[in-house]
Image (tube, rainbow, N blue to C red):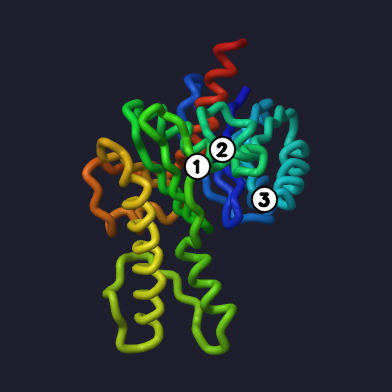
Amino acid sequence: MLRIVADLGNSRLKWGRLDAACNVVESATLPLNDPRSWASTWSSWNPSNDPARWYISSVNPPVAEVLGNSLTSFGRMELRWFRSAAEVPVKHALEHPQITGADRALAVSAAVAQNPDPPGIIVSCGTAITVERVDETGTWQGGAIAPGLGLAARALHLQTAQLPLVVPREAPPAWGASTLPALEAGIFWGVVGAVRELLTHQAASFKSLPWLVWTGGDAATLAPAITWPSSSVVPDLVLQGLARIMASDDLKG
């Protein structure tokens, strides 16, 4: 049986294929609302039409329904959904885990497993940016949610009459002599500034400097802009969090 993990967000769908030890050995980033591309990718991954077990994180209920119907039409599928933090085995102090995103919990779970000496902070860079705080006991205390690069860019474009859509893909100068570079500067360094402030304030009460893990589609773009002594970029933390749960379930039989 094939083992597959999937991260369904607000901007993209990411799949990961696991080996027998539940390590992610292949991944694919797919568009939302495009069952044809899903079917094509699945055919290339599974030409023999073997049965598969899927663990899926979703923060996008409308697309989740379409995805579920598509997957079951592919053949023999076992689907397990993770729709909130309450469904993820992670030590936390959240007030309402049942309405907190599963993707946040999965990223924290994987980061803590890879960095067992807390405290720590996890920055997930997707449609939204989340900055998650893990205290000295390894407890996820919650975090902060801010607009990501793409969301900030779309807000400026859609809520103004003349500003074009610009999404910076690398660090620009901090000012521009025309509208486009000025937008790039404001969007990029505004997001970086927000993350830097959140890191500073979340780390302030720790007795030691926390480790820092970046993840998500814009992690490689944003991480170099902030200097931190113990920092790493792990693009697929959510998939790795799902893989850990699947491995644990395998051991339970």
Q: Earlier in the sequence, mark 1 or mark 3?
A: 3
> Mark 3 touching mark 2, by CB under 8 A?
no
Tell me the element at label 2.
loop
Separation (CA) of disc 2 from disc 1: 6 Å
Q: 49 or 1, which is in the foreground?
A: 1
Quarter of the picture holding the N terminus: top right
Let me know if residue 213 appears in the view. yes
Q: Is residue 206 above or below residue 193?
A: above
Residue 77 is labelled as: none
The spot of residue 162 in percent (x, y) is: 53, 89
Q: Examine the image and state in which quarter residue 178 appears.
A: bottom left
Identified by mark 1, the residue type is: Gly
Q: Is residue 31 above or below residue 70?
A: below
Residue at label 1? 142
The spot of residue 244 in percent (x, y) is: 50, 26
Separation (CA) of disc 3 from disc 2: 21 Å
Q: Earlier in the sequence, mark 3 or mark 2?
A: 3
Let me know if residue 47 appears in the view. no
Identified by mark 3, the residue type is: Asn
Residue 60 is labelled as: 3
Residue drawn at x 64%, y 31% is 87
Residue at label 2? 94
* Neighbour tally class for label 2: few under 14, some 14-19, many 20 plus, Cα within 10 Å: some
Q: Residue furthest front?
A: 205
Q: 6 or 219, which is in the foreground?
A: 219
